[in-house]
Amino acid sequence: MQIFKAYFKVIYKNLTQMLIYVGVFFALTLTLANTYENPAKTGFVGTKVNIAIINQDQDSILMSGLKDYLSKNANIVNIQDDTQKLQDALFFREIEYIVRLPKGFTEGLINNKEIKLEKTNVPDSTNAIYVDSLVNKYLNTVTTYINNMNGASHEQIVKYVKSDLDQTTEVKLKNTSNDISKNERCEFYFNFLAYSLFTILILGVGVVMMVFNNEDLKKRNFCSPKRLNNISFQLIFGNVSFAIIAWFIMVVASFIMFGSVMFSLRGVMFLVNSFVFAITALSISFLISNLIKSKNAMSAVSNVFSLGTGFISGVFVPQALLGKTVLTFASFTPTYWYVKSNNLITKMDNINMDNMAPVFANMLIMIGFAIAVLAVSLVYIKQKRMSK
């Protein structure tokens, strides 16, 4: 296994450059883990709308009850009954709703006569709909008591109405923010892994293949007692071993950072998806290493390729924020399908075969990329040999 040993000797001599990307990866992911804050608890919080009440009717107990009820659910702003001032207040959003109680409104309410309230509100305001519902709720409840409690005083009716409208229902929302935050951090970790792992594989495989593709060394290997198939096998074995070691080093920290997630089925899916991507990235790295002859050019290509595919595929910018044209172009790279699978794994509420089918389909696409690129590499190598 002299070729295999020589493979990792070359890796060792060029280890510093690759460790830089490993360090950047762990620094960013660890920083995220320590600074990430759980999303705020989801719940309903009532808001009070600024409204104005213009009472052109008598100051009755029923109308006082309406004002008291609205004051609990809205901010009543005192504004003079002047058309210009009211319009200015609406324009500058000092108030969003004006309700005008016309003359004879109380008497009409008691006698079941149809007397409409006059209202003015900010156009297309959802808050106006909310205030409408409050006013209607109060007036409908008052009407119900008036129609069914003959002889009851207005004080009694307002008391009953207040008691009814004060009834509330407690709603408790299950807080899953801790699980969601872990899943999202895990998704970021494995998405960013695509950039670092791709760069490391291109650099590592590239520098080794440049050494073994050196003309003088190839001639010496041809003269050696080792058969060409044996040399090729050891190089392939070295490439696969290097890819597995690089992948293992990149994912091992995830078990420390995300604990329970990585020991769940979701974590297994993240690991399998990243491993398939590592094999695909190895295939592409092998092709690039046979095309590039200069070490400096290899470093430039690794950065351009890994950064370029990362930006258009969702590694650095979420796919949901990228344009349709960009995503269409990115779909011709394995990184796109890898990130897409991570997004699907994160969003799964129930992990079963039906939900995992799209993820497996994406993995098959990545494997297809690996096979196609490897075939191109082998054809290129064969043609290169025949031309000499």
Image (cartoon, rainbow, N blue to C red):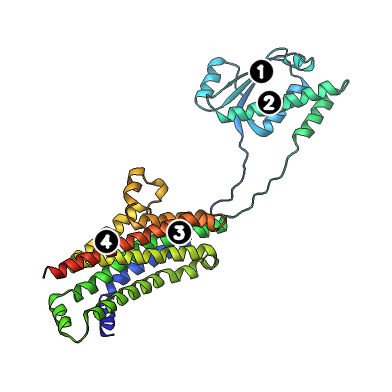
Residue shown at 30%/71% (left/top)? Answer: 18
SS state under label 4: helix
| Quadrant of the rendering where the N terminus is positioned | bottom left
Residue 284: image tag: none
Quarter where residue 158 is shown: top right
Q: Earlier in the sequence, mark 4 or mark 2?
A: 2
Q: Are marks 1 and 2 in contact (CB under 8 Å)?
A: yes
Q: Which residue is mark 3?
A: 360
Position of 255 compared to 144: left or right?
left
Q: Which residue is mark 1?
A: 117
Quarter where residue 216 is shown: bottom left
Q: Which residue is mark 2?
A: 135
The amino acid beneath tag 1 is Leu
What is the x, y in percent for residue 34?
A: 47, 63
Bin the neighbour count of mark 4 within 10 Å (Cα to Cα): few under 14, some 14-19, many 20 and up: some
Could you tell me how far apart the alpha carbons at marks 1 and 2 are, in whole angstroms? 10 Å
Residue shown at 73%/22% (left/top)? Answer: 63
Most foreground residue, 372 or 33: 372
Most foreground residue, 64 or 130: 130
The amino acid beneath tag 3 is Phe
Could you tell me how far apart the alpha carbons at marks 3 and 1 are, in whole angstroms? 61 Å
Could you tell me how far apart the alpha carbons at marks 2 and 3 are, in whole angstroms? 55 Å
Q: Earlier in the sequence, mark 4 or mark 1?
A: 1
Most foreground residue, 320 or 141: 320
Q: Earlier in the sequence, mark 1 or mark 2?
A: 1
Q: Are marks 3 and 1 in contact (CB under 8 Å)?
A: no
